[in-house]
Image (cartoon, rainbow, N blue to C red):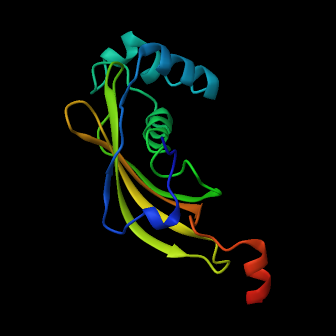
Amino acid sequence: MAYGRYLEEFTAGEIIKHWPGRTISEADNTWFALLTNNQHPLHSDAHYAAQTQHGQRVVLGPLVFSVGIGLTVADVSGRAIANLEIEKIEHHVPTFNGDTLYSESTVLDVHESRQGDRGVGSVETRVRNQRGEVVMTFRRKVLVPKKNRPTLGEKQTQS
């Protein structure tokens, strides 16, 4: 089974539904808060969170992003030379312990780089919960190799 895509395998306008999803457990949220030293009680104190507009603990936004982008790796950046840019991360609705996240990406643009053996794919990813609500969107650019890239000898003769 292939892991990741070559540049030629991206098509502008294509929608990629990433599978499988990932259920966020209370342990995931707690460990992520501890690892990142995020001490906001909304994420760790059930009594405090019960008194907020959400009525319960909220999963940390950076964890939602990390899972959301992680779900796309096999289809988008599995062959990446580099992740070039991540932009416009937007939180739309909160994620709670026990929610399952799914990602879906739209290929916005694909273009070859000057080197000729690679190119950039731009995607916008929507992260949804099990109810189909969009919880987060973000865009990123990934540098990926071309499948039929010139060999070293071909590059030298083209120079």
Q: Nearer the viewer, residue 79 or 154?
A: 154
Decide if residue 121 is on the left or right side of residue 118. left
**Residue 132: horizontal and vertical position, in percent?**
20, 37
Decide if residue 12 is on the left or right side of residue 34. left
Rendering quarter of residue 82: bottom right
Is residue 57 placed above or below 84 in the rendered structure? Answer: above
Is residue 97 placed above or below 103 in the rendered structure? Answer: above
**Residue 40: horizontal and vertical position, in percent?**
51, 25
As drawn, which residue projects farthest toward the top? 47
Q: Nearer the viewer, residue 97 or 67?
A: 67
**Residue 65: horizontal and vertical position, in percent?**
46, 40
The residue sitting at 42% across, 71% down in the picture is 109
The residue sitting at 31% across, 67% down in the picture is 13
Q: Nearer the viewer, residue 123 or 117?
A: 117
Q: Quadrant of the C terminus?
A: bottom right
Is residue 138 placed above or below 144 in the rendered structure? Answer: above
As drawn, which residue projects farthest toward the left? 131
Rendering quarter of residue 118: bottom right
